[in-house]
Amino acid sequence: MQLPSKYFQDIKLLQILIKYSDYDLNIDTKNNSMWLELNKIFPNGNLLDKHLYELDEKGIIYYEEIGEDGFAPIILGRIKKETHSYLTQLIEKTEIEVINTENMIKDLLTFDPEKLIKNIEKAQKDLNSAKEKALENDLLKPILRPIEQIESQFKSVEAVSRIYDDVYKNIIRPIQKEGEAGVKQTVKWAIISIVASTLLSVLIGNWESLYKLIVN
C-alpha cells in the first residue's frame, strides 16, 4: 500500500539527486535519465526548478543555473552532508505518519459502534435525570442552563453516532470481513481515512467530554 505523504516528493527528489551524484558529491546534471526521473515527480518543470532553488536556499543542496536568456543554461548541482541529514529527517517523519495511520485504521476497524450507542443512551438518561432533579429543586435550578447547553450539543453528537453506525455497517464491517490484504488493493483505504479523520474524531472526542460533564 502506497501511503500519501507530504514528504514523499522531497524524499524521492533527494534520493534521485544522491543516486546521480559522484564520489565528490557533484550531481550529474547532464544525465537525461536523472531529469526523466525528476519529471515523474514534478511534471511541471517550473515547479521543479523552483523547488530545487528552495532546497538550495535552505542549504540542503547546492543548485544553480548559469546562462543568458535564449540560451540553454549551465546547471550546477551538488549534494551536501545536510542532504543526507534532511533526507533522514523526512524518512523518520514519514515513518511516524505510517505508524499513526496504521494505529488510526486499527482503532477504527476494531471500534464497537454498539457499545458507543449504549454509552450515549446511558449518558442521555443521566442527563434527563439531572434535568428532572434541577426542575424539582430550586437550589439546583441554576444548573438548568448548562444542562440545556449540554443537551443541545449532545443531540448533534447522537446524530453523528447514528451516521457512523450506518458507515460501520455498510463500509467498515465489510472491510473487516474482507481482510487487510484485500483492502490494500482497493480504494477503501481512502474512505477509511476520511471516516477516521472526521466522524470518529468528532464522535468520540465530543462524547467523552459531554459524558464527563454529565457524570460530574
Image (cartoon, grey):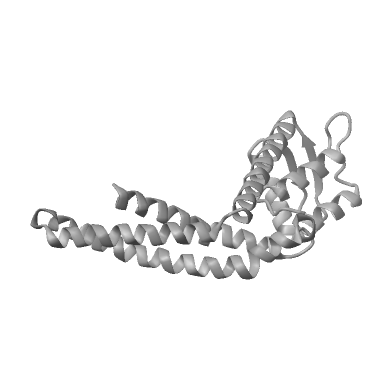
Task: Judge whether 207 appears above or below 96 on screen.
Answer: below
User: Which percent across, then down, holds residue 167?
Assistant: 58, 68
- Give the quadrant of residue 136: bottom left
Work out whether residue 130 or residue 94 is closer to the camera in this orientation and state it. Answer: 130
Q: Residue at x 18, y 55 (%)?
A: 143
Q: Decide if residue 202 is in sight here.
A: no
Task: Judge whether 108 appears above or below 58 on screen.
Answer: below
- Give the quadrant of residue 87: top right
Q: Residue at x 41, y 51 (%)?
A: 208
> Does residue 147 appear left or right of residue 27 in this picture?
left
> Does residue 53 appear left or right of residue 25 in this picture?
left
Work out whether residue 195 or residue 53 is closer to the camera in this orientation and state it. Answer: 195
Work out whether residue 136 or residue 164 is closer to the camera in this orientation and state it. Answer: 136
- Give the quadrant of residue 194: bottom right
Task: Judge whether 81 appears above or below 10 on screen.
Answer: above
Q: Residue at x 74, y 29 (%)?
A: 81
- Tally of numbered tags: 0
User: Which percent across, then down, holds residue 75?
Assistant: 81, 46
> Does residue 173 appear left or right of residue 138 in this picture?
right
Q: Quadrant of the N terminus?
A: bottom right
Work out whether residue 149 or residue 68 is closer to the camera in this orientation and state it. Answer: 149
